[in-house]
Structures are given as structure tokens and as C-alpha cells.
Image (spheres, helix red, strand yellow):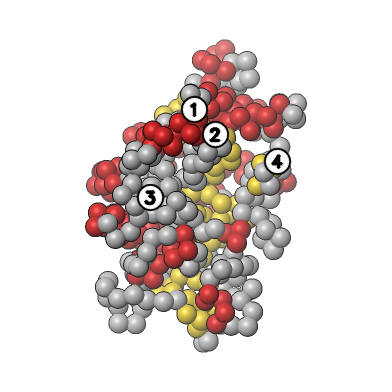
Amino acid sequence: MLNVSSTTLRDAPDPVAYAFSLINSEKGVLVHAIRGGAEINGAMDGNAGFFDWSTQFDGVRAINDCWREDNQGCSAWAYIQKDLMPIVYNYPSKQGGGMQHAVGLMVDPNMVSDKITKMHVIDGDTWHRLPGGIHESDPLRHQVRDATHIPYLCVPAPPDNPTFTQHYDPFYNTGTGQFEAYVGEKGEYWPQFFQDASLTKEYTMVRQCEFDYHLDGHWDAWRGAMLASYERAKEQVYTGKVGTADNTPDWKLYLENEVNLNIYDADMDALSSSILAVTVQHNWCVEQLKYDHNREQLCSEYYGDGEEQIIAASLKAACRLSNQLSHQYNRWIPVIQAGFLSNAIVDLDTWNNYASNGANAESYMEGYNCCDSYSDVYDYTCGGR
């Protein structure tokens, strides 16, 4: 559990540097990918220039993206901190690149800790999980008559006869009345449950257990499980045991971690004091998919000759959203452009570099000056303000 305090953001003389300092410390930040810039611009154009947080894109809510009828406050975020791979939800698709150049929101997790509920080592596919935490398609649910509200927890304690070569299965514990996976005090055995035989959506993403932010030991075990998962993924790709020749697990798995917040679009003001920046991903498709042998063809199919325009639209949307929030909360909420890693591919070179040297914010992020290009839609810091 986070147990460090953050200064008041209003007192930060340089909010970009302050956000970087959080990433480069033990505190970290949370980033929520909203949507591509063209769609956000369209939503704002249709609403007198104002972005409404209840906006839906193809049925996916802007904030409550993991909404389901029995979990309506669900909002999925990625935890970004220098010891971890800087991956957000940015999966590519043939529809304008999907989320590769998404606009996002960055907040201080220490200031929203009361809203954090569960954490997953990789994307939790949360909108297909029952309220208790088990996935709708996980056969484990059939060990009981009704699994709807039964917790499914990663337990920060070692399994029986712990070894890093044995496979372990989660089970229903009749003594505690919950599904459990004993992943180790530092999450070191997590791969032995969910990654040893395969690194795919069905085996890893669907079957994984949940860490509970408010239970002792879960935050540290979750962080340790991510580190263990990275090392196992690199080993699996190196040896050719998992994935394709292009380092892509199965073109269905999402590699970013997931932190769930319980927040409703009508309560966005409750996040106001925690908002650090608006983010936009600006690294090109071929860079994000650099290990895919078909990257040139794929990126051409995604964008044609229009990727530069897609990035420009996202920068414009980010500036518009930054301007709205800055005026709304009477403090500068900057735009940060980031070269996040793809959540579709194991980027061996970069993963190894970050594992050895740390993913410091300055190595893949920088502030963006909206006044230079978008002063027609942005005025908060322009003109010497």
C-alpha cells in the first residue's frame, strides 16, 4: 500500500517536473487512456468545446471504461513508476491505429488512494469479471455453485512446497470462502500460476488473480509479481517458448498493468486535486511495434499516409482538454507527450534497458507547449500568464 504523502499540486512551481519526480520516486503516477484525439475533438466540437466525462466511444465510457451493470464505478488505470515497464492501454488496430496515439489523464495515486480497489499484473479484462473478481470464462468458477460475489485474491504468501520450476493452480479455499493463489510475499511465484505454460489472453490475462489495495502486503506483492512477470516474459521470448517470432504473445493479450478505481463520471471533481497532466502518446507505430517483422505493412494498414495527422489531432485534443481542466480548477494542468511502450509486444531491448537502468520519466516523456501550435484552442499559459 502506498504510504507516502504528496505535496499540494497547487504549490508545485513546475507541474511537469513534479509529475516526473513522482515517476522517478517510489510514488509513481496513474495514467488512464481515454481515446484518440480525433474522437475527443469530435466530442468537444459537438458540445460547445467542452469535454463531458460521461461521453461514450463505441459504447466504452471515457472514465468508466470497465463499466458493467454490477460494477458501474469501474475505471481502469496503469501504474507508471521507474522500476516498472511504462506501458498503458494502447493496443493497435486497423481503425486509425486504435489506441496507439490516445489522449490520457495522469493523476497522483497517493491522492486517490481511497478510490483504489484492485490491481492486476497485466490487463484484468475487468468488464468481464464477476463482482467478486473471477473472470466469467475462468473454469475455476465452477468449483462453487455461484461464484458471483466470491473474492478471487492473490495471497502474499508462498504456495506449498515452493519452487520456481513447479506449476501451481489457484483453488477455492473452503476455510476462507474465497478463491486464492498463493503467489509469495513479493509476488515471486505469480508466473508459476499464470505464465509458466503460456503467455496468452486465456491462460494469463483471464486466469490471473486480483490484488486488493486495502489488504496488508498486497501492494508490495503486486509490484513484485510484475517484476517476476517481466523476467519470465523475456525468458520465454528469448527461448521461443511463448509468442511468435515477432515477440507478440497472441495478438489478444494486453501487457499493461491495471489498477481499478471506483469513480463515477459525475464525480470527476473528486479527482481534481490529484490531476497532474493530460498525456498523449506520440511515438510512431513502427517504433511501438519495432519487433514485428510486418510492422511497416501493419502501420500502413492502420494509417496509410495519415499517422502524422492522427498524432496532431491527439496533441490538439490534449491541449483542449488541458485548457478546459486548467480553467476549471484554476491551476496549470500541462500536456505531457510520452513514448509509452506497446501493450501488444515484448520489446526486449527496451525492457532490458529499463530493467537495468530504470524507466526514468525524462527518457520517454517531455512537456508539450500548446501555445506554439494550438493557441486558437488553448490560452491558459499563453501571453505570459
Q: Provide the residue designation for mark 3.
A: 248
Q: Provide the residue designation for mark 4.
A: 55
Residue 184: percent from the left, percent from the top? 36, 71
Q: The C terminus is located in which quarter?
A: top right
Q: Determine whether label 4 and label 1 are within 8 Å by CB.
A: no
Callout count: 4
Q: Nearer the viewer, residue 244 or 11?
A: 244
The kind of secondary structure element at disc 2 is loop
Type of amino acid under label 2: Gly
The kind of secondary structure element at disc 1 is loop
Circle nearer the N terminus (3, 1):
3
Q: Provide the residue designation for mark 2.
A: 96
**Up-down: is 123 above or below 81?**
below
- Regarding residue 267, the answer to whether it shows in the image is yes
Circle nearer the N terminus (2, 3):
2
Residue 203: percent from the left, percent from the top? 44, 65
